[in-house]
Image (cartoon, helix red, strand yellow):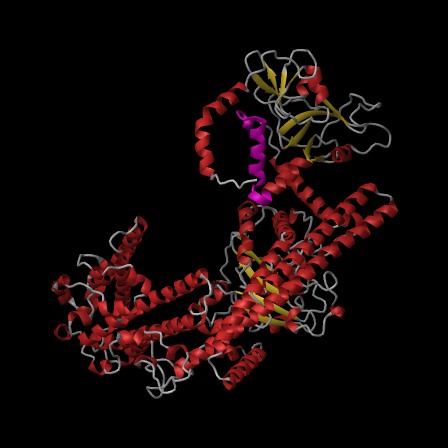
Amino acid sequence: LTPNTKSQNDYLREWQYKTEDYLDLLLRREGPPSNRMCSVCPKDGVYRCHGCMGEPLFCTHCCRTFHSRMPFHRIGQWTGGFFEDTSLTKIGFEIHLGHAGQPCPGLTDEWCDTDDEGDQFTDGPWIPLVNDPRMTMVVDTSGLHSMMIRFCQCAGALSPDMQLFETGLFPASFTSPKTAFTFAVLDDFLLDNLECGTSAMNYYSKLRRITSSVFPHLVPDWYRELMRVGRQWRQVKQLKWHGFGHEKRKPKAGELALFCPACPQPGVNLSMSDRNGSDPAWLYSRSLVMDGNFKAEHLHPTNPTDEVALTDGLGFMVSDARYKMHLSQAQDIVQRSDCNNHRAVNQANASRHQLEATGIGGCACARHGCFVPHSMVDFQKGERQMNMDYALCQALGYNTDGIDRALTFYDINCQYNKHLSKRIEDSPYLDLPWGMEIIPGIGLWHVHGHQDKCYVRYASNFITGAARIDGEIMETLWAPLNIISPSARGMSTPHRKECLDFQMNDCNFMKMIRISKFLCRKFKEAVQGVQDSRHAFDRLSETAEDDTLVKWEAEATAAEDDRLHNPSSMDIYEVQLTKAPTRKQQELHLLNRQAQWPAGEIHRGAATWLACGMTLEEAQVALLIDVKKMGKWPTDNQTLAIARHRDRLQGQLDEFVRVAPTFLGNEFNSWDHLDGMTVMLDATELDSVRSSSEAADRSDDEDQRDIPVEFNPETVVIPLPSNIGIERCAEWGVADLVLQEIVLREGQANDALHAVRVNLADKAVLFRTTVRSAKSQARSTRAWARVHSVDRVLNLNTQIYAKCRKQLINLGADDLLMKYWRLEKADLKATTVVADPNARGQRNSTLAWFWSIDVEGDSTSNDWMNEFYCVHWLRTLALHNRWEEELLLVGREMTWTVAFFMHKSQEWVCRMQEADAKEITGHHCYAARQAQMYLRLSQHAEDSFDRTKGVAEVAE
C-alpha cells in the first residue's frame, strides 16, 4: 500500500465539489421508497426504524416482532406526508421478563402503585412517550422510552427490581420500580464524565433533546435519579473490578483503587527476600511527588447530617473520620517562608468561609504519575502542613513493607521538611514505616522560584537515586480532575469524593495499560542519555589532571553522603567565590543608609527611583537590539511584537517622568534639553559579540548603519542625573542624586560583567564539549543554535555595560573608570584559556581584565574560572550519574511491570478456581476474562521490553 499523501485540507477541497450531491441524498432519505413496502413481508410499510441499518420500513406486525430484542430503537410513522416520531409502545410492543421474552404463564393485569416520585407529563404528539401509570420509564442512550414491562409472577420469581437488573436495567427504586436506566446509558454517562467532564445535568439534558428535539422541556426530568443511580452503578462496578464480588468481604482502605505497576511494591511485583546484594540501596525506593489543587473546591453541604457515603476511604480520598480527628488535634502553626515568597506557605491559612474544602492535595508516584491510593485529602484553609503530613504518611504506608527509602518532591520542601519528623512524632494519627528515610527534593520547575541555594540542595539533578525525574508530573494529573471539579463543587461531600476517586482510578488505569510504551520510550532515552553524557564527561575530564579529578570526585561523594543531614554540603555544585556588590545590593545599601543621613541632605526614596530609571535604560537597550535585528523586511509578527514592546515601555517611561519632579524639583518641568537627544547603540560593542551567522546575513552597508533617529520609546533619553549633567544637578540642589547614581552604576557594571563572564564561559565549554565533537549535521546545527543563544545574551549585557560606562563618564566617576575599562573585541573571545585553564602552554597566559575584577585577591588570579570549571565538571558528573541510574532503574521497572501483571492475573485465576468450586458460572467467566486481560498485558509488556532492549544492544 502506498502511503496517503493527502492532507485534511485536500479532502475538504474535494468535499466542496460533492456538498450538493450529499445534501440532495440526505434530503431523499426523508421520504419513503417508491413502493413503500415492508422490508420483511409484502404489506405496506408504515414505520421506519431510525436505529436499524439503512432505516428500513416495517408494517405494524413486523415492526413489533423484529424489535423484540431491540426495544430501544426509535421509530417514525408515515402520516402520508412525512415520518412523525412515535414509539414502539404505541404500536403495542411489550417487554416480558423471566421467560426468555415470552409472557409469564401467571401474568395478570393487576397494577401496583410505584414508590417513584417523578414529573407527570402531558401525553400528545409532541413527544414520543405514553403517559400511562402502567408504563415503566426506561432511560437509554437513545433517549427516554415509556415501555410496557411485564414482570414474571411465578412462585419463587425474583423481585421486580432484581428482574429488571438481571435484564440489564438498573431500577431507580426497589419496590414496584417504574423508572430504570439501561446499563448502556450508565456506562456512557460515566465514560462521558471521565473523558469530557460532562455533568449529570448536561448529560440528561442531551438525553431529553434526543427524545424530542423540538419539545425537550416536556420530557420528564429524571436528572436526580440519574445522579443517584450513577453513584450506585459506579460503586457496583468498582467492587466488581477489584474482585469483591468473588471474595465476599468488605474492602479495606484504598482497596478500590489501582496503583502503579512499575513502582516497587513488596508482595505484589517483587520479593524483598530475593533482592540482589549487588543492587544499590536507592534502587528499592518509593518516589513520590506532593502537590495541592485549589480548583477542586467544595461548597458547604445543605444538610451534612443526612449524607450517605458509599465508598468512604476505599479509594484515593482518605477516610473522613480519622482525618478529621487528626485535624482536630494537629497544631495549626503559621510558618512564614525564609526562602522565597511561596504561595503554599504564606497563604496556607487563607480561609474562604463559603467553602467546606478550598481544594485537595495528595501524593502520586513521581516517575509514572499514578495517584497513591488513600492519600488524597481535602484542604480547609489552604495547603497547610497538617493536611500534607497526613497525605504523605498514608502514601508512604501503602505497599511499602521492607522499603526503607523514600524520595519526596514538594514545591516547598526546603520549608516543609524541616520539622516533619517532629510533627509525625507528636501526632497519634501520623506514622511512617519503621526505618524509612525520607529524601526531600523540589521539582525542577518550582525550584527556580526559590533562592539560588535551593537548586543544588533540592533539585533532582543532584540527588543520588533520583535518576532522570523532574518532580513536576503531578501538575499534569490535575488537568482531568479540573474538568469535573466545577460540576463536583456543589455535590454532597460523599458524592464529590466518589467522583474524584473514580476519576483518579481511571487515570491510573490508563497509565497502567500504556506503561509498556512509556517504559520503552524511557529506556531508549536512557540508553542515548548515558552515551551522550559519558561522551561529554570524558571530554571534560581529559583537560584536568588526575589528582584534581580524584579530589573533585571525593568532594562530590562526601557531599552526597552528607546531603540529608546537611543540605549545605551540596553547595559545592555552585560557584562560591565572593562577588562584587550587585545593583540590588547597592540599592539596599543606600536605602539602609538613609536613616543615618541628616534630613535634607538626601532625597529619600531616590535610590529606588534611580534604579527604576536604570532598569528602563536596560529595557531600551534590549528593544534597540531587537529593532536592529529585524532588518529591512520584518514580518507582521515581528512588527507587532515590537509595537507591543514599545507600548509597554512608553507606559513605564510616562510614569517615571511623571514622578521625576518629586526628586529633581520644579525646575525639571521647565527644562526641555533632553528632548533633542536620542539613545544609540554602541556599534563597536555590538559588532564584537555578533555571531558569525548574524554577520553573514547583513551587508557591509547595514553593519555601518546606526539606528534611525525617530521618536520611539527606545530612543527617548531618561531624566537621570547622568543625562542631565552634574552641573545642572548642582544648580537644582540635587547633587546627592549624582552620588547615589554612581553607587548604583557600580552595581550595574558588576551585574553586566558577571553576565558577560558566565556567558563567555558557557560559550567556551559549548565549543569544547559540543560544537567540536558534533559528528552529524543535526548535532552541529543544535550545537550552533545553543552558541547563538548565548551570543544574544552576551550581546545584550555587553551593550548594557557600554551604556553604564558611558554614564559613569557623564557622572565624572573617574576613580571607578580606572577599575571599569572599555570592553575590547579581543576581550570577548571564548579563548582556550577560558575553556581549559589547565591546558598545556597556558600556564603563563592570563584572562582579560574583567575575569578578576569580581574575585577577592590578586587581579591576575584565575580562581573564578577554575571554580567555574570545577562546578561544570561536578554537574556533568552528576548528569552522567543520573542517566546511568535511569538506565538501571527503567530496566528494573520493566521487570516489576511484568511481575505486577502476572500477580494480578494469578489473583484472578485463584478467584476463578474458587468460583468453579462453588459452581458459580458468571463469577468464573468474569474471573477468567480478567485473568486473561492481565496475562495479555504481561505478554505484551514482555515482548515490547525484549524488542526495545534488543534494538538498544544492536545500536551499541
Residue 407, above or below 586: above
- Image quarter for residue 362? bottom right
The answer to whether residue 76 of the structure is visible from this angle is yes
Residue drawn at point x = 12 percent, y = 65 percent: 673
Residue drawn at point x = 29 percent, y = 79 percent: 593
Residue 343: percent from left, percent from top: 47, 63
* Depth check, front residue: 638 or 313: 638
Q: Is residue 839 left or right of residue 308?
A: left
- Image quarter for residue 437? bottom right
Magenta-colored stretch includes residue 214:
yes
Residue 288: percent from left, percent from top: 60, 64
* Depth check, front residue: 10 or 389: 10
Residue drawn at point x = 56 percent, y = 50 percent: 481
- Image quarter for residue 126? top right
Residue 326: percent from left, percent from top: 64, 63
* Depth check, front residue: 511 or 427: 511
Question: What range of the chain is rendered magenta?
Answer: 193-218
Numbered marks: total: 0
Magenta-colored stretch includes residue 373:
no
* Depth check, front residue: 42 or 807: 42
Judged by its main secondary structure, the magenta piece is helix
The answer to whether residue 376 of the structure is visible from this angle is no
Q: Is residue 273 left or right of residue 215?
A: right
- From the image, which quarter does the C terminus lie in? bottom right
Residue 285, above or below 48: below
Residue 531: percent from left, percent from top: 55, 68
- From the image, which quarter does the N terminus lie in? top right
Residue 24, above or below 578: above
